[in-house]
Amino acid sequence: MIGKPIAIHILVLFIVLPLCAPLVYAQEEPSKRVLVLNSYHKGFLWTDNIVKGIESVLGPEENEIELKIEYMDSKSTKYDTQYKEKLYELYNYKYSNQTFDLIICSDDNAFDFLLDYHEDMFPGTPVVFCGVNNPEAPDLVDPSVFTGIQEWANETEDTLSQAFKFHPETKKVIILSDTTPTGIQSFKNIERQIKKFSDIEFIRFDSSMSMYEIEDNLSKLDEDTIILYETFFRDSTGRYFSIPQGVSAVTSSSNRPVYTMRLQYLPYNVVGGKMMPGVLQGEAAAEIALCILDGEKVENIPIVEISPTQYMFNYEQLKRFGIKLSDLPEDSIVINKPYSFYEENKGLIWGIIAFSIFQTLIIICLFVNMSRRKRAEGDLKRTVTDLERSNTELEQFAHIASHDLQEPLRTVSSYMELMKRRYEGKLDSDADDFIGFAVDGANRMQTLITDLLAFSRVGTRGEPLTPTDCETLLSQTLSDLKVSIEDSGAVITHDALPTVMADGSQLAQVFQNLISNAIKFKGKEQPRIHIAAERKDSEWVFSVADNGIGIEQEFFDRIFVIFKRLHGRDEYSGTGIGLAVCKKIVERHGGRMWVESEIGQGSTFYFTIPSKATGEQL
């Protein structure tokens, strides 16, 4: 016996599940339904290709479109009023309780059927037609409901023009076109296009002839005649011919080339021509249908009057009638060509060739580059040799400057000092001034030579880089500058400084020059100087900041050039070499040096020392 709570749950399920089922079914239903009504039967190549084109556009799952495909079979069955009425009864019975968002019809018979029964069976449903030969189609439809693509182009004219180039001796053209509805419409289209060939005789073989008569006539054609196969499905005996049967019968009996505008005939020994592939018809119709399903109004989509076409030929028949591939129109498609490794792998072959050429060019470039490199290495060796010789000469000059030049300067300076002490006040005032100028000049010249010597020895007389404690180095520097600091009243502060790989004496000279400059170029306020260091990536960035007079931005680079001064000697003493020496020392250590400043706001001098192999990392 089932418990009461369980029984209630089962009852609820029996009530709720039927209500939920339609919802689940509705979610699985496709968002759009399309009926495809084909004039002919499945297996008819033209129709199959149209369907294939439609499915390629509308068939993907993401479109959520259900395709319902019908075949009227009006090619193999006599399409008369009685058969049309039977189809109406069948479709009316079959689809009276179904609705479609759109209908696609292919070829004339399906188009005519919908003209008669559309409003009765599918009222208001948009229709897109394709493969319709009737030139009056645009005038027969309601443009708010019908649109599509006519099977209409200059394919006959183009095919014959090309055939006459292949066979310039042509004077007659046999046209095979039966009297089925399709044949009648197709021949009207042909008549429209052959009017320009006034010097050619055109003869029509239609359904008033039996296939036996046609075969007999085609076997006796002169060399000035070619054949144009349009459509032939029924002969005078009422016999129906499939495409393989009809086309093969004609091509096997004819001693002259057979041309056509129908892709489905191409495999059966016709030469070829300007084709109107059914796949392109189907794809174009489906693209129009997709626009309508997406919300575009039918009346906004005009009927396409010119169908897409493509030259296509059968290689075996080209060879039979001596037609060269080089004589074909550009971009022609050729079937049944014998296998050609080059043709099948043209892209790969040319890709390999291009790659080989590219590799060859790279190799040539490498050889050229190697030759240039060897020449450059030779030039570099010579340059290094010249540089070494120049440095040697510079060092010799520095030696001369430190000894040979300073000695006479000391003599001049000593005697001028002696004259100043002995004769000052005993001669006139001009003599005193002259002696003072001479003494001052000799002293400045001696200082200049000393500084120049220091600059030249940065790279040649430096000590090896060793772990150097910058805290200790700064303390020694401040001790050396004690008198200058006390006289100026400068306040000097600093952050914790690191240990770096450096030449201690040279790095001390950098600190000394920067602090001395900060004191020298003080402003109206008490000098305040701060030294700091910050680790950034693979280097230490040192800074010496002051509150002095500042520097204009346009002189930032100039101040690091030897002998470049921004002020006269009567304003500030010095030779203009100090910052150049600092920059050269920093660069010897593998670093950089620059300044940031504003007039009246002080200056901050920065320099970097690489942090590789610093004392912290040893």
Image: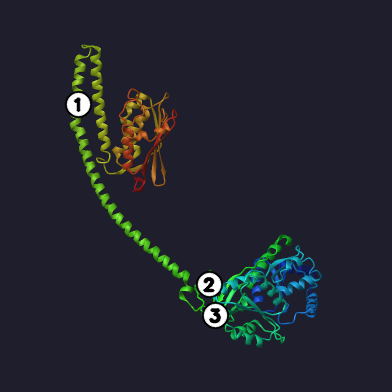
Secondary element at image label 1: helix
- Circle 1 sits on which residue? 410
Residue 393, x across and y down, in percent: 21, 40
Q: Quadrant of residue 57?
A: bottom right
- The structure's colour scheme is rainbow
Q: Residue at x 54, y 69 (%)?
A: 331
Q: CA distance from mark 2 to mark 3?
A: 13 Å
Pick the quarter of the image with the N terminus. Answer: bottom right
Residue 543, x across and y down, in percent: 40, 37
Q: CA distance from mark 1 to mark 2?
A: 102 Å
Residue 258, x across and y down, in percent: 59, 79
- Circle 3 sits on which residue? 317
Q: Residue at x 38, y 27 (%)?
A: 521
Q: CA distance from mark 1 to mark 3?
A: 113 Å
Q: Mark on residue 328?
A: 2
Left or right of 538 in this view: 323 = right
Q: Residue at x 35, y 30 (%)?
A: 517
Mark 2 surroundings: few (<14), some (14-19) or many (≥20) residues within 10 A: some
Q: Is residue 152 visible?
A: yes
